[in-house]
Image: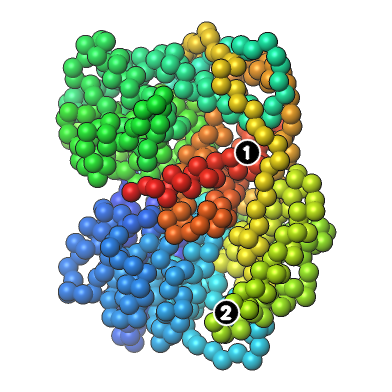
Amino acid sequence: MADVKENKSKLNYLIQHSAGSGKTNSIAWLAHRLSSLHDDENTIIYDNIIIVTDRVVVDRQLQKAVMGMEHASGLIKVMDDRCSSSDLADALNGNTKIIATTIQKFPYIVEEVKNLNNKRFAVIIDEAHSSTSGKNMSAVTKSLASGEWEYDDTDEMIEDEIRKHGKQVNVSMFAFTATPKPTTLQMFGRLNKNGQYEAFHIYSMKQAIEEGFILDVLSNFTRYETFYQINKLVESDPRCKTNSAKRQIARFVQLHETNIGQRIEVIVEHFKNMVMDELGGQAKAMVITSSRPEAVKYQKAFQKYIEHKGYKNIHALVAFSGKVNLEGEEYTESSMNGFNEERLTKEFDKDEYQVLIVANKYQTGFDQPKLCAMYVLKKLKGVNAVQTLSRLNRICPPFDKKVFVLDFANTYEDIQKAFAPYYTTTLLSNSVTPSAIYDLEVEIDGYLILNDLDIESFNEILYSGKEIKAKERKMISFYLDKARKEVQKYPYGTQKDIIQKLRSFVRFYEFLLQASSFEDVEIHKKYNFISYLLAYISIKNPGAGFDLTGKIQATKFVQKKTQEHKDEEQTSKPIVKLPSAEAFGISQDKEQKLSEIIEEINSRTGKAYNKDVAVKAMLQITDILGKNEQLKESAKNNSSKEFETTYYDNIDDALVEGLNQNEDFFTLLLNHSEMKKEVMGIFVEELYKRLRNEK
């Protein structure tokens, strides 16, 4: 408050508070305090306080905390699932003092709130991460930027648009996160005396653990490894895409009845003998699966096992989105649990249920103090690992709570490495510079797919200030189609490289606009053209895949305890770096005989196999995308082609996070050469249909 009183709306604030240390209450109180804060001249500093969340709807817990503040009627408005973007525009134009909304509503109101009469805003961001550097965050700053101007030409309009990205003189951002990514640090952090970006205020994981507000989730960590043998059932030795074959084999192993049965036995017996008596017999556990079919199968296997053993006091619920079809049967979360999804958290809190089996639900933002154990069946990386395991860190007075992690997919070193940047403080040692944009521009220009005159004419139409009618739309289509045909002249592999570089250009430029004062009108024109081109263009893989169903078998499954760690001192590695432009490049797939792929997998099976099972991460990325709120919103409101653009943009986030945190892992994962977007193209249509049909 003291810093804001002195600097008013000049600065941004990054608040790095450990998960479980009361972020929701901090946000609610901050909004309350800022809404009435005056400067030394007794002038109100902020006209509106806007709480922004990246979820589809404003979190219920946050709603309750904000609305619970003592206030006069009409001064606080929560944009729940009944509110539209127009309701948000009305609130901003009106006298509502505190507004809680989702970030996804802002792109639709930019034109409706062009002139906010030079109001001053405090924007509180609930869980700041990489999505705050893209189009949605740009829409927030453009909507709230003060002033209205007259323009003489297109270049002046573009210059003003560029200025409305990034820090605005009338807007302060208060970004909350327990796990700031490098992009978040550069966007909202402050430069310290050593030239590193850091948070304005830190309440570290280490401090919170030492002061007894949260628990050390790695205090009891046990690693189980899965060993097995793959064999070919067919006499022929077909050639197939390496990536596709590895994914199919990994999925086959993951869903194998023997594998699931063995793991369920380990999980249930560990919970029964080591966990369930904690908290006076109220202890609960989560099982983290890597896919929705896996969640269904584990829940069925769990039920079968406890019935076979006659256990009457252990019962499991399951959580996943949409519908799952397995062996001719259709499953939903509601049908398997026997009640609506909305009731799950309340039902799980009851004594009747002890275990929750999840597929990309309740891994973030889920606050259940009775959780004492987590059984991890999928690869977790970076921030995702920290957020998932941090579900365990809540204390549960008056009990002296113990926590347990049994991990079938990650080593202790992997998880420790994920936690290290956030254990004490997080510092960004490098920053994105315009050179990365210019380097990418040179590479794109080298393909000779873009015409400068077309880009100029395209932007003239875009900034004409008039409604774009049929004639103008036809011209826009002409320019985009011309560029698309140039791309399609290249072989399929080169086309993929071109699209990858175009997406990298858009993503880097959007971040640079938000994080710096970078101004280049010609680059912005090219950015506009490429953004439309990516939504317009679509390339198809000419090669058909090879289905391995019925052509392989898995035998000799063994679940073996290979690591056990208790009460070890956690390490801190606070320095993080932004990914370079090169990190976005994805190498080419190759073809191998099925026998060679199997031989490669089996040759690595053994003590080092913990790295080989990382093939499952390909499936994990798809599941991560399935819970992405921006993708859900896009699927609900866009065509499949428009959705595809958002889909690939979010794949970049997942890939960059992996490459940045563990390059060696991804190199090993895909045979030292793969991990490219081509394989993810298989899932676009399926994911679009799934998200669009979600209730």
Residue 544 place in picture, x, y as percent: 67, 34
Q: Is residue 537 above or below residue 385?
A: below
The residue closer to the viewer here, 211 or 604, is 604
Q: Looking at numbered disc 2 in the image, what kind of residue is underneath it? A: Lys
Badge 1 local density, few (<14 within 10 Å), some, or many (20+)? Answer: some
Residue 124 occupies quadrant? bottom left
Q: Quadrant of the N terminus?
A: bottom left
From mark 2 to mark 1, how far is it between C-alphas? 38 Å
Secondary structure, mark 2, is loop
Q: Residue at x 52, y 26 (%)?
A: 251
Tell me: 358 left or right of 467: left
Tell me: 688 left or right of 517: left
Q: Which residue is mark 2?
A: 469
Residue 309 place in picture, x, y as percent: 25, 10
Do we see residue 510 in this rendering?
Answer: yes
Q: Residue at x 64, y 28 (%)?
A: 546
Residue 412 place in picture, x, y as percent: 50, 27
Q: Is residue 650 above or below residue 73?
A: above
Q: Looking at numbered disc 1 in the image, what kind of residue is underneath it? A: Val
Q: Which residue is mark 1?
A: 679
Do we see residue 228 in this rendering?
Answer: no
* Marking on residue 410: none
Q: Is residue 242 above or below residue 228?
A: below
Q: Nearer the viewer, mark 2 or mark 1?
A: 2
Secondary structure, mark 1, is helix
Tell me: 171 left or right of 657: left
Badge 2 or badge 1: first in the primary sequence? 2
Residue 13 occupies quadrant? bottom left
Q: Is residue 258 above or below residue 219?
A: above
Q: Residue at x 30, y 51 (%)?
A: 22
The residue closer to the viewer here, 270 or 641, is 641
Tell me: 655 left or right of 100: right
